Amino acid sequence: MRDICIADCETDPFKYGRVPKPFLWGYYDGSMFVPFWGKNCTTRFVNYVKQKTIILFAHNGGKFDWHFVFKHFDPFTKVIIITGRIALFRIGNCELRDSFSILPFALEKYKKVDIDYAKFETDQRDKYKKEIIEYLRYDCKYLYELVNKFRETLGINLTIACTALKHWRKISKQKSPTTTSYFYDYLKPYYYGGRVECFEKGIIKKPFYYIDINSAYPFAMLSDHPYGDKFNVDNKLPKKTEDIKRCFVHIKAKSLGAFPYRTKHGLQFPCDNKVRDYFITGHELIAAKEANAVKIKKVVEVCTFYETVSFADFVNKFYSLKLQAKNDDRKDVYLFCKYLLNSLYGKFAADYRNYFEYQVIEKKYIQAAAQDGWIFNSILGDLALVQKPAEAGKFNFYNIAVSISITGAVRANLFRALKQVENPLYCDTDSIACRDIRNLNISKNLGQWSIVAKCTGGAIAGKKLYAFRKTDRKYITASKGVSLTARQIYRVAAGNIVKYEPISPTFSVQKPPCFTPRNVRMT
């Protein structure tokens, strides 16, 4: 097995309109730290590592650090890109990876040294050279600790989802399920994400609670879920509740906020007197019936699976390990287990038709590559990135039914809670902001609701755009796609438009780094 080493770079401080450039690279092998300072730091760093037969990790490298070494790619190098992130490539003997693919959280959740980034400015950095290098050394050291502990605890795979699937197979003694594109496409209308809703918008002046469910997806995975590739199709609902859980149901019905519905504005949860076609899981239908929140006009289709699967052994093992790590103050293992538990269900819904093979070639070979089925993607300095769809047979469809059922169970549990609380203000997948929680069972147990914060007020400006003021006067904020302060979110919630100018550019393999300003308004 190759040794694991760490890389990181420091750049000009982020500033709107300025594309940062590295002035310092660091290499760490667990004992020796080697810094590369100055204008040619990237070239010297690459020349140093490319002779080493190692796996070199950089955190968020696929969205940042590795973009600075594009010009050093060897022609005809294969590159693995996952959802726009450079996950793996090679330069010389060195295999470079993005540790964010296995550790999908900010390094500061584990350990992080603070520094004033003004010291990184061109006219200041030489004065603080020793301090900056030491800061980088600690970042490399902490990432090394994380990656090596991850390998020791879970092994090294390309992504956290691959790691989760591998451990589930080992625990369950089952092979990865395989289905077909027809199976996937037939059931895809039943597949949705989490529930995000604003029940009230604007400035919230009265106190409220912010609560969440303890490990919503792992809890849902304890139940039995549809499995296998065989199901019966008819237009009759099973009489037993347990049998309904094995079903996906297409109905024409009136729903009082119980079911997801796709619109041009995104996922909605209608609560009106209009009959619509709903594609739902049995979990959601059961929850809606409990609350008298559905009036079925016609059952169009019921897909009832013959097999079911439970992930209880997988969940129990890693949830127990997570609790033990928390008690032992092992933040690293706690984080591994937390993200591992939330990564498995989505893997079952992977659609390999969206996968591509990528290769870096010299620009003069673009036309020749096209004759071999490669499609031009982008220019990388003197090189070009080309791609072609992944070959059939290299990847398999797993079983989208599993993902459909688990996500449906999570939405059903959230709906039940929404019907129990009073005056809900906002919800997002596994959390609720509301004024009264007296009817909920509050506890720290798996699948139960717990209080995140008691809030004295807040501002809700749209989905994933809010600021909740806690009793200690600190804020819980969300501003997806932008980075707004609580004050700015309050301005948006009051009806104003806030101009957002990102200080960091977006790095992409398809185009040069760019800044995308936005006018943020209430949605």
Image (tube, helix red, strand yellow):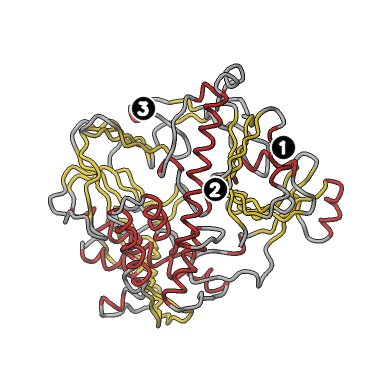
In whole angstroms, how far apart are the C-alphas of marks 3 and 2?
A: 52 Å
Q: Nearer the viewer, residue 52 or 458?
A: 52
Give x and y (percent) for residue 367: 85, 52
225 relative to 105, above or below: below
In the picture, residue 18 is in which quadrant? top right
Amino acid type of disc 1?
Arg
Residue at 30% x, 36% y is: 201
What residue is pinned by disc 3? 495
- Mark 3 or mark 1, whichever is nearer to me: 1
What residue is pinned by disc 1? 44
Q: Indicate which disc, 3 or 2, sits on the residue closer to the N terminus.
A: 2
Q: On the rendered image, what quadrant is the N terminus found in? A: bottom right
- Mark 1 or mark 2, whichever is nearer to me: 2
What residue is pinned by disc 2? 30
Task: Categorize mark 3 by other alpha carbons within 10 Å: few (<14), some (14-19), many (20+).
Answer: some
Q: Indicate which disc, 1 or 2, sits on the residue closer to the N terminus.
A: 2
Amino acid type of disc 3?
Gly
Label 3: state its secondary structure.
Answer: loop
